[in-house]
Structure formats: C-alpha cells, structure tokens
Amino acid sequence: MTRFAPGRRLAAAATVAAATVLLAACSGTASSSGGAGASSSVSGDSAYQLTAQTPAPAGDIDSFTWSLYAEPLSLSYAYAFDYPPNTVLSNVCESLLRWNSDLSYSPGLATKWANPDPTTWVYTIRQGVHFHDGTLMTANDVVASLKYNLNPKVGSYWASVFRNVKSIEKTGPYQVTVTLSRPDATFNQYMAVTPGTVESAATLAKDGANYGNPSTGVNCTGPFALSSWTPGQSIVLKRFDQYWDPTLRAKAAQVKFVFLEDPNTRINAWQSGEVDGGWQVPPNAYAQLKNGGQGSLYFGTNTTVVDEIVSNLKGVLSDKRVRQALLMATDRQGIIKAGEQGVGDLADSLVTRSDWVGVPPATVDSYYAGLASYPYDVAKAKALAAQAGVNGQKVVIATSPISADSDIVAQATAAAAKAIGLDPVIRTIAPDKYTALFSDPAARKGIDLFMTAWYVSIGDPLDMYGVLRTGEFSNYGSWSDKAFDAAVDDAIATADPVQRSAYTAKAQQISQVELPWLPLFTAPTSLWLGKRITGVSPSINFLYYPWAATIGAAK
C-alpha cells in the first residue's frame, strides 16, 4: 500500500511539485541505463535514465550517514506507513517474504509457502534465525507478529490487509497456517512487505503500548540492530553479527540517520560530505547535484504516482465534474518542467504500468487505451465547472515545505482552481503535522485537497485501488462507489494474475472517471550517493528491503 511521503511521495503519501508560473513543456521520458553503475541524466534525448544497480563496493566501511526528511513518529511496524519509518525499519526488521528490486518476491523469514486451497496459506518458518537480543525466532513469534495487526487496541495502519483473515495458527514446530474467510489474491504478496514483519513475541508483550518508541525501540532479525534513538536528532543502527543471511551481511558497521526537514539543508549536507546519501532528492537540486562532482545522482524503478487527494467530498468537490475540470485545468506538464526539472511523465491513472506484474504488456496497454483522459484545456475545464455550479466557492489546498517542488504543485493546483472559478486557499503545514493527514481524520478537517506521492507496495494495482473501497482506512475522502467496490472485490478473489487484472481494469476505469484522487504525474525513485559509498539498487523496494546492508566503500 502506500502512503505518505514528502519528497517524492511528498510525504506519504505525500509529495510534490507544481508551478506558480506554469510554462508549456514536454514531460520527461524514462529510458533504461542497462548496465550496473550507469548514471542518470537530466539532459539529452530523455530527461532521465533508470539505473538498476549502482557500482559494486570495494569493501566494508566503518560507517555512513543518511538523511531523512522527517523523524519517524514510531518504529512500530504497525505504523510504518510512510517513508521515514520504512526507510529505517527495512534494515532492522524483516518479513516472511522479500520484495525484490524488480518488484518480484522471494523467500525471507519463511523458506517457502503453499496455497493448498483458495483460503489457506501455509508458511514454513526459517530455522536458526536470531532476534537482536540473541533469542531464536520460532513459529510462535510469527503468529504473535501477524496477529499484532489484528489487535484493535494497536490500531495498525495495515489492518485492512488482514480483513479476510479467519485464523493465524502454529501448525508445526516451524510452520504457520493462515486461514482466510474468503479468497484473497493479495494477502501473500503483502507478506513480503510491512504486514509480514516478524518481531519477538516476548518483546511485543513486554513493551506493550510503548513498543517502537525511542525508549524501547524494536527487536527484530534484520542485518542491522537499533543502537540508539535520540529524539529530534538521529537514529543509529549497528551491524548485527548473528544475522542469518550471509549474502546480505551488512558492509557498514554503523549507519546514522539524521533528520533534516529543510531540503536546502539536506542538499548542502550532501555536497559538503557531512551526510553521505539520501533518498527523495529535491528535484530543484538535480542539475546542481549532477554537476557538483561530490557524488552521483541516480534514478530507479518506482511505483509512485503524485496525486491530489480529494479529502472533502461534501462541498463543491462532491460533483465529479468539478474534479474533472480541476484536473483538466492543471498544467501537469508545466509541473513536471518547473517542479521536477523534466524528470517525470504525465500520469494517466492512479497506478503505473510497472505495477501490473505477471500481466502481458499488450494487455496492460489495452487497459490504459480506453481510460478517460484530461488533457490541459482551461477553456473546456471552465465551461464544465460552470455547468456544475462553480461560482467562487472556497477550496483549501494543503501543502508542506518538504521540498521546493511541493510548493509548485500547490501553486499549480491553486491556479487551476482559480481558473475554473473557485476561490483557492493554500494552507502550509509543517512536515511532521502533514503526516497526520494520512492517519487522523481530525487533521484533515477543513482541508479539501492535499498532495501525496502514493507508491504501490506490491506488484499489483490492487494495492492502490483496494484503499479506495468504501470504508477503507486510506480512503481519506470517504468516497463510495458500489460498482468500483464490486470490481475490486472480484479482483481480490481471483488467483490468476491475468484474469484478476481484468477486474482491476474495471476499477481503474471507474476511478479515472470519478476521480476520488487526481493523478498528476509519475517520477522515478531518486537517490544521492556521496563519493565514499556505493552498492545500493535505486529501486522503490528500499522501503521493505535491507538496502543499507548492500552499501560499502566506493573504489
């Protein structure tokens, strides 16, 4: 699923970009760099190139420093629904399966899995795995960890993943069986990301409501263990020498995460060498970093679409014609040029084509061919809005100073609103408060639109469309459409990925007409590596894969 994020997800969901003065411009087009270590480019025939893997490290390194645009509110996996906590936890905690850089999944803390019937998943648990306190992982820990998401007192942000779970039981010394009340084609895929996290049952019981706080931390199985958390300053991880997987033994003895909310501060810290690297590079710094000579800028696979979430469907935006007019009046190509430095593409739906893993490309193309589209046309948009009764109604647009491009998106959305006859008001919210928009209905009160860079956490568009069903946690505007719900439910109940995709495509068609969220553009994952380090894959899977363990000393 995915969520909030500033920066490239402007903040989990959140995100990015737009323009005060929007100039007509062509969007960037991605091209694959092919070989490992090929660097990205923001010039030439394409606006950027995708890199699969940065150059291999020469060896181990004592430590490196990494930037986060905000401090995690918690390190409890139940609330790891955004970039800051996931960026850290992906190196400390692990799931039953692994989500790989090509968006496939493979064995993790489970050596294998079986689906003997449509409502049963059986996991064989890996033996000899130590938690960071030295105790051995057992099937009991797996049961307790999965059930943690079902505890209403916990209030897990991932509870909807377990909506069809009937029971979670230990069925052997190293075997756990999950029984569903109905077939769910996405459940096993989620076991490769946060919902499949395994924590010590003893730790969960001991720490209770304080689990994941700075004073208690976490006790997982990853290649790094939590060493310290100094609120307001940093989180330090240390290499875990009892880690079970020799292929992912951490090359760094220590990783220090520093919290740098101001984008210019992050950029300066990278260029000075004070901080060695970071994800979600502010787009206004692309050219500066590319030519600065103090490191390398990379772009990689992403599943992110930057959207404006319609969080109030009771006012003027309750009419879909107004939402359609607003998207039509938004100069999205101008946003990409001004806010993303040309590194991006117009979004033609709420999901990217890379999300449809296991579906033939020609079939995927056919799903997009018939979608409703909203080319930039202010005159047509104004006429459509007038038909819907737009006449100076106020619209509040939330943004956050996470990066320079976030203001551009807010200004562009406001310009579009004004062009169709609305009275836009931009409300700027601090980064830590902006995150609350994704978890607290009270924080969204009085806000009509807010930005997100929404990433899909599994290789299936249902991760996006599932959150828009009636009553879902992340359906922030409480949108409801019976035909959409039925299409998503049919898709979830269908095991074959190609057959399932046909139902998902129906949901996509409906959402593109109704526009509960307004899709703006897509952009690649961005990564900055200073001269001292290398070895990481610049893929969106860094949110769930122990990426820091692969980083070592540059040659």
Image (spheres, rainbow, N blue to C red):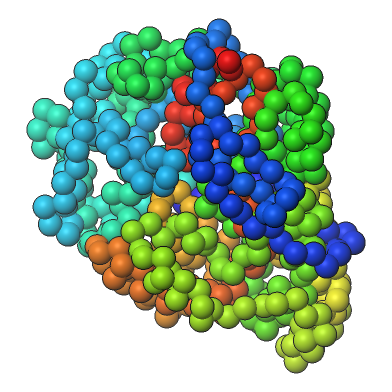
The residue lying at 55 percent from left, 7 percent from top is: 62
- Which quadrant of the rendered structure holds the C terminus? top right
Does residue 532 appear to the left or right of 204 in the view shown?
Answer: right
In which quadrant of the rendered view does residue 334 lie?
bottom right
Q: Position of residue 44 (x, y in %)?
A: 73, 50
Q: Nearer the viewer, residue 513 or 340?
A: 340
Q: Quick one: which residue is furthest to the bottom in this view?
A: 387
Does residue 326 appear to the left or right of 542 in the view shown?
Answer: right
The residue lying at 82 percent from left, 85 percent from top is: 379
Q: Quick one: which residue is furthest to the right in this view?
A: 21
Q: Nearer the viewer, residue 30 or 347?
A: 30
- Reply above or below: 113 against 511: above
Q: Position of residue 359 (x, y in %)?
A: 35, 63
- Reply above or below: 456 against 208: below
The residue lying at 67 percent from left, 23 percent from top is: 530
Residue 270 appearing in the image: yes
Q: How many marks?
A: 0
The residue lying at 37 percent from left, 30 percent from top is: 94
- Reply above or below: 309 against 7: below
In which quadrant of the rendered view does residue 234 lie?
top right
- Reply above or below: 513 against 275: below
Does residue 410 appear to the left or right of 213 in the view shown?
Answer: right
Residue 70 appearing in the image: no
Q: Position of residue 225 (x, y in %)?
A: 45, 17
Q: Nearer the viewer, residue 524 or 154?
A: 524
